[in-house]
Image (tube, rainbow, N blue to C red):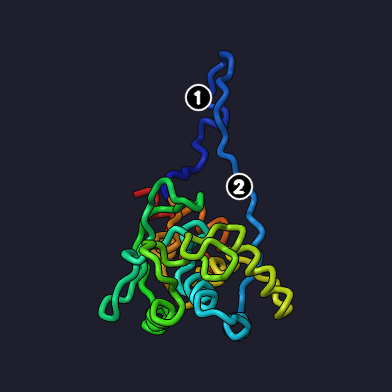
Amino acid sequence: MPHGISRAGSKGLLTGIAKSKPVRQKLVKLKEKKKFPGCLTDEQVETLVDACNRLRDKLIILMLNGTGMRKGELLGLMHEDIGDFEQHYVRVVQRDNHPNGVRAKGQERTIPVVPELLKIYNDYLIYEYPDTDSGYVFVNIWKGEKIGQPMNPYVLNTMFRRLSEKTGIHVYPHLFRHSYSTRLLKAGFAPERVKYLLGHASIQTTLDVYSHVINEANLWEVIKGEEE
């Protein structure tokens, strides 16, 4: 019998209930499951990358797909946050007063990445990054824009709208986040590890969104861990 549950004694179910005015107790509110928006397939990601004419835009897609970071975290990324070819990682760091108005919403974290992502980043710096002393990774490179200034969310959204029209794939930055986390969970990553990589403040957020992937055994392991 599970801990905390006892059988009714011989004194009856009403024994011990006070006859005074009952006290109101706060009930636990069960959250309604969030609707899962779906995932991108590997083939769709490849199609989106091939549809890009700029290394910067290819890097954006691969960075989102390979880290699961949020749009604000991506646009706030600085060169010092990216590891070298011996240390394959990207760090999400909380900073204030970004000139493009973005912010890192989630927890600070270090996300391991594949070496191929760093190669694309290196090519972008060599062949396409403008002559600027900006510390930001993703900057304006088009003529007519303020070249070298950090990209703002409007430019990023416009890029994905055009990609959707060009490829027929309905895509937006946050969809890569769902694809990334689902891929990890299906590969057997523990929910607690996925929580860290996503920057969720609470494991409950991870469970609410990705309960379609996490099996019952994992759910109980997580719940037990939260209670300890």
Q: Residue at x 46, y 74 (%)?
A: 66
- Label at residue 150: none
Q: Quadrant of residue 78?
A: bottom left
Q: Residue at x 30, y 72 (%)?
A: 83
Q: Which of the pair 93/139 is nearer the observer?
A: 139
Secondary structure type for disc 2: loop
Q: Earlier in the sequence, mark 2 or mark 1?
A: 1
Q: Residues within 10 Å of mark 2 (few under 14, many from 20)?
A: few
Q: Quadrant of residue 133?
A: bottom left
Mark 2 vs mark 1, CA separation in Å: 32 Å
List x then y, in percent, for residue 22: 58, 19
Residue located beneath label 1 in the image: 16
Q: Amino acid at mark 1?
A: Gly
List x then y, in percent, for residue 125: 40, 76
- Label at residue 31: 2
Is residue 90 at all visible to an observer of this figure? yes
Q: Amino acid at mark 2?
A: Lys
